Image: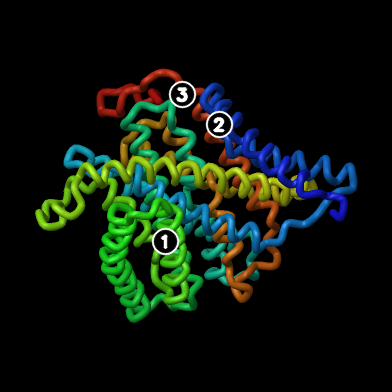
Amino acid sequence: MENISTYNILFAVCGLVILSYFFSILNRLTRVPSVLLLLGTGILIRYVADLLGYTFEVPPTVVEVLGTIGLIMIVLESGLDLEITKERLPLIRNSFFSALVIFLVSSLAVTGILFWWLPETPWINCLIYAIPLSIVSSAVVLPSVHHLEPEKKEFLIYEASFSDIIGIMVFNFFTSGHQIGVQDVAWFGGSIVVALVLSVAVCFGLMLLLIRNRINVKFFLSFAVLIVIYVGGKMMHLPSLITILMFGLVINNWELIRWRPLKRYFSNENVENEVGFLKSITAESSFLIRTFFFVIFGYGIGVAYFQDLQVWELGSLIVAALLGLRFIYLRVVHRYNLLPELFYIPRGLITILLFYKIPDAQRIEAFDDGVLFFVILATAVILMLGAIFYRDRPVEITGANDPTDV
C-alpha cells in the first residue's frame, strides 16, 4: 500500500471509468449487463491482487457511502424517467401491483426457506434478510432495457422503481424496532403522509434553486440538499426516499400542474430546460457511482465463497423461488407475456446496501455472505439470458393463444 502513488490511484480510477463506458457499449451490442461485467472486473482485480500480494481491504463505510449516494441517485433517476399520462395509468397500475405482489410473496417464500434452512433463527430475523433479497434492482434494470419495445421497457422501469421504494420502506419498518401492531402500523402510515407533505415544500424549494438561482452552481447543490433531506429523514425515521421520488416525478410531469400563479412563476419551458440538464447530470452521476460500487463489491467477493456447497444449495433454492413466483404471477395472475419480463429479476445495489444496514441485534451469524453474492450473480446471469434470447416481438397472452407460447 505504501508504494501506491497519487498517479497510480488516478490511473486506476480513470481507467475504471473508461472501462465502464466500454462495458455500456458492450451491453448494447451483446445485451450482457454492464453490472455483471463490473462485478467480474472487481473479482478479477481481487484475484490478481492476491497473486501479486497487493491485497487490501476496502472499509465497509466506503461501500455504504457509495451505496447510499447511489440509492438516492437511482430513485431520483427513476422519478425523472416516469411520465404520468392518462394513457399510461393502466401500465402504472399493473407495474405497481406486479412489484407489490411479487415482493410480498417473494419475501414470505425466502423467509420460509431461511427459517427451514436455519431452524434456530427467529422468523423476524429471517424476514429481515429476505426483504433485501426480494427487491428488484432498478440500478441493474434501467441500463438493461434499452433494446426492448416501449411498453415492455416502461413496465420494467416502473416495476423496478416501485420495488425499490416498497422494499426500502418495509425494510425500514422492520429494522426500526417496531412491532406489528395497530399503533406502529398507524405511525408508519402517518410517516408516509408527513413525507408527502414534506415533498411539496422540497419540490418548490428545489425548483426555486434550479430555475431562479442566478449562480451557475446549482445542480450538485440540489443533490447535496437531497442527500441532507434523505439523511435527516432517516434520523427522524421518515421514508425520505418518497420525497426524492416525488421531486423527480413532479418536475418531470410539470405540465400536469394547472395552478396558474405557479405556472407564471415556473413556466413549462423553463422547467423543461432544467429537467433535461438534470436528467443528464443524474444519469452521469449514477453511472459513476454504479461503476465504483459494483467494482468494489466485486473486489470483496472471495472465490472461496463459491467453494462452499451450502452456498450453492441455499442460493439456488432462493433464486428458484424468486423465478418461480414471478412466473406464477406473470403467467397466471397478470396474464402477461413471459419474455423477457420473467428474466428481469436482478438483485443489486439496494440489496447489498440494505444488508449493510441490518442492525447487529438482528443479524444471523449462521448466514453465509456467499449466499448474497450467489443470488446477485445468478440473477444477473438470468437477466442476461433473457435479454439475449429475446429477439422477436411476442404477442400479449389472451385466452385464444397457444398455452405453450411464451
The residue under the point 44% across, 65% down is: 230
Instruction: For marks 1 and 2, give the one nearer the viewer.
Output: 1
Q: Return the residue at label 2.
A: 24
Task: Name above or below for residue 383 compared with residue 168.
Answer: above
Identity of the residue furthest to the bottom in this view:
183
**SS type, badge 1:** helix
Q: Return the residue at label 3.
A: 390
Q: Nearer the viewer, residue 186 or 70?
A: 70
The residue under the point 27% across, 66% down is: 201
Q: Return the residue at label 1.
A: 226
Mark 3 vs mark 2, CA separation in Å: 19 Å
The quadrant of the image that shows the C terminus is top left
Pointer 2 local density, CA inside 10 Å: few below 14, some 14–19, many at least 20: many
> Where residue 174 sits in the image (x, y, percent)?
47, 70
Q: Nearer the viewer, residue 72 or 350?
A: 72
* Lateral position of residue 245 relative to residue 354, left or right: left
> Where residue 42 sits in the image (x, y, percent)?
71, 43
Residue 190 image label: none
Q: Which image quadrant is residue 85 in?
A: top left
